[in-house]
Image (spheres, helix red, strand yellow):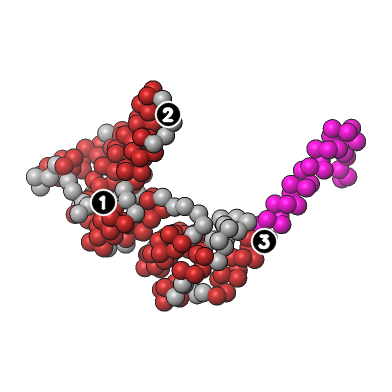
Amino acid sequence: MGIFISFEPDRLKEVEHSSQDSFELEAYNRFNDERISEFLARYDLSTEAGIESIPVEEARRYPDGGQSVVYMPEQILNRKATEYKKQKKYDLAISCLRKANELYPHSFYAYQRDSYERLVDMLVLAGRFQEAKETHLSLDRTVGTYLNMLEYMKEHSNLTDEQKVVYQKLNIDKHIEEFQDREEYYYLLEHFPALAPRSFGGYRKMKNSNSANYKKIIDTLAEHNVDLFCVKFWL
């Protein structure tokens, strides 16, 4: 079947523009893939030693940010960590994220605490709880807390008083609530793994709905004289 194209001026411009966009996207993706392949040819990301061998100079390779963040070494490492997480190869995922954390300060792009915190979350999933706590504390000291960043942005912005109230509710209060939920969930993973849901998202869902399984967690912990709302996971 042939393809009929109307030769009305506006329609023709639309077809030409769509074709140009498609070409530019293909070129963009091809360029990114080439840079990524070059990086993977230099370093073996299938071993911890290969990952650890990546020097910080890699983060300085593109001092102007390059043409895309996609092929920045820290981004490649983050995507590889996600792959390893799905395969439950936590040691390799941790190595990727640890190296990414080393590269962040040297990158053209600015990274916030939540990017650094991925390493902590992966350590928890791997059951390396003490290491996760120590890494979290170290990041508090070297990078700063996410809460401090949110509060700084609120106080040093041009927001009106009314807008600051909304910002407090949508960002700061929301973060504090999530931080508390995460501490509870990580405590369960460490001390009562049989009771912990499979994911943090699952825990928040059951807590917010006050489900039967959530009530079971509360009751079981009460039998051990533990109040879930008062537990401490972080150092």
The amino acid beneath tag 2 is Leu
Disc sitting over residue 159 in the figure: 2
**Residue occupying image coordinates x 58% and y 58%:** 64
As drawn, is 170 to the left or to the right of 214? right
**Residue occupying image coordinates x 84% and y 32%:** 10
The amino acid beneath tag 3 is Phe
What segment carries the magenta color? 1-29
* Mark whose residue sits in front, 2 or 1: 2
**Foreground pick, 63 / 8:** 63
* Residue furthest top in the image: 162
The quarter of the displayed image where residue 216 is located: top left
Could you tell me if residue 17 is visible in this image?
yes
Could you tell me if residue 47 is visible in this image?
no
Q: Are marks 2 and 1 in contact (CB under 8 Å)?
A: no
Q: Are marks 3 and 1 in contact (CB under 8 Å)?
A: no
Report, in whole angstroms, how far the alpha carbon at label 3 lies from the one at label 2: 40 Å
As drawn, is 215 to the left or to the right of 146? left
* Mark whose residue sits in front, 3 or 2: 2
Q: Secondary structure at mark 2?
A: loop
**Foreground pick, 150 / 42:** 150
* Mark whose residue sits in front, 3 or 1: 3
**Residue occupying image coordinates x 57% and y 74%:** 41
The amino acid beneath tag 1 is Tyr
Residue 196, placed above or below residue 127: above
Q: Which residue is mark 1?
A: 186
Residue 2, placed above or below residue 164: below
As drawn, is 174 to the left or to the right of 159? left
